[in-house]
Image (cartoon, grey):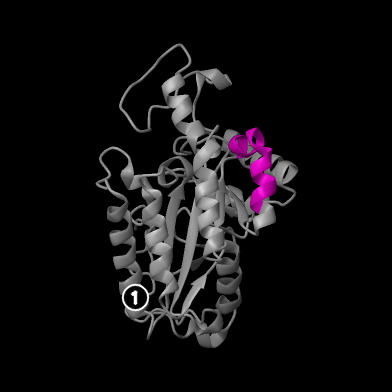
Amino acid sequence: MSGRDFLGYGRTPPHAEWPGGARLAVSFVVNVEEGAEYSVSLGDARNEDVYEIVERVEGAPDPCKDTHFEYGTRAGYWRVMELLERYGVKAYANCCARALTLSPWMAEDLVARGHEIGCHSYLWERHAGMEESREREIIASCVRDIEAVAGVRPLGWHTRSAPSPNTRRLLVEEGGFLYDSDAYNDDLPFITEVDGKSHVVVPYGFDTNDMRFQRGGGFVFAEDFARYCNDAIDWLWAEGARRPKMLTIGLHLRIIGRPGRIAGLESVLRHLAGLDGIWYARRDEIAHHWRRLGGLPEWRQGKGA
């Protein structure tokens, strides 16, 4: 047996019972990665090569890549924050620890605006293939550094792309994480057991995500992002009349924060504002809600095929 779950909640998922009778919980995730990318100028052995253009600079700093990332904090951040504030949306800030320590002003501003601060590892790197001892140290240092700069400890975790087979167990072992988002397999959270302890998983999404503006992603114009996200919203909102669902919309400061793309985010926010039954939720709110539901016998009976 593979240990993978191809059924999930099956034909009759549980009723989410979102606050206020909402039909759809919408989680905006603002990824804070600027300064956590591999960068020779920051002392790393190599430069990151995933950004707007295809070019690899080896053995020396890469001002082109460096300044592409810097745009996110210098300009993109303020556009994204202004829009979220205008529409009264609280988001989950998915923060790489090094990025936040290099921009402590951002940690202060995010907390002041009421956004949740979670952890996106220390560097903007995948954990697949990482040695367990190193990964354990990284998780501990992330908690320590984020708490020091932001004044709050992260309750949520999301790895860039692939986690290791140990990541979730190490998060539970650390003891302070309420949930992780290292899953892409459902429109609802779920509770899993790790070493005899229950752990909430709040799935993430790569499709309703501005990362698709990057090379090969298929989004070119702001309207592409808006049309795709709004179609997802409409479909899940319709399903939510009977079985409420959840939708994650992923944002990156250096991507959606560009003047030619930010209108796509405004279009999505405007579309949501025209619908009844929307709960704009921080991910810790979703995880706490799901944990409370998971303890109700009548809710458990609602699961299954």
Residue 209 lies, in percent from the top left, at 38, 52
Main SS of the magenta part reads helix
Q: Is residue 31 visible?
A: yes
Q: Residue at x 33, y 59 (%)?
A: 226
Q: Which residue is mark 1?
A: 10
Picture quadrant of residue 302: bottom left
Point out the image quarter for the C terminus.
Answer: bottom left
Residue 21 lies, in percent from the top left, at 50, 84
**Horizontal side of residue 183 vs 156, given as left or right:** left
Point out the image quarter for the N terminus.
Answer: bottom left
Which one is nearer the viewer's eye here, 268 or 278?
Answer: 268
**Horizontal side of residue 115 vs 23, given as left or right:** right
Q: Is residue 193 visible?
A: no
Q: Is residue 100 magenta?
A: yes
Q: Secondary structure at mark 1?
A: loop
Q: Residues within 10 Å of mark 1 (few under 14, many from 20)?
A: few
**Horizontal side of residue 116 vs 266, given as left or right:** right
Q: Is residue 270 magenta?
A: no
Residue 140 lies, in percent from the top left, at 67, 41
Residues rendered magenta in the picture: 97-110
Residue at the farthest bottom position:
298
Please name the amino acid that badge 1 sits on: Gly
Residue 133 lies, in percent from the top left, at 60, 35
Which one is nearer the viewer's eye here, 267 or 165?
Answer: 267
Judge whether 224 appears above or below 10 on screen.
above
Picture quadrant of residue 304: bottom left
Q: Residue at x 34, y 79 (%)?
A: 239
Judge whether 20 appears above or below 268 on screen.
below
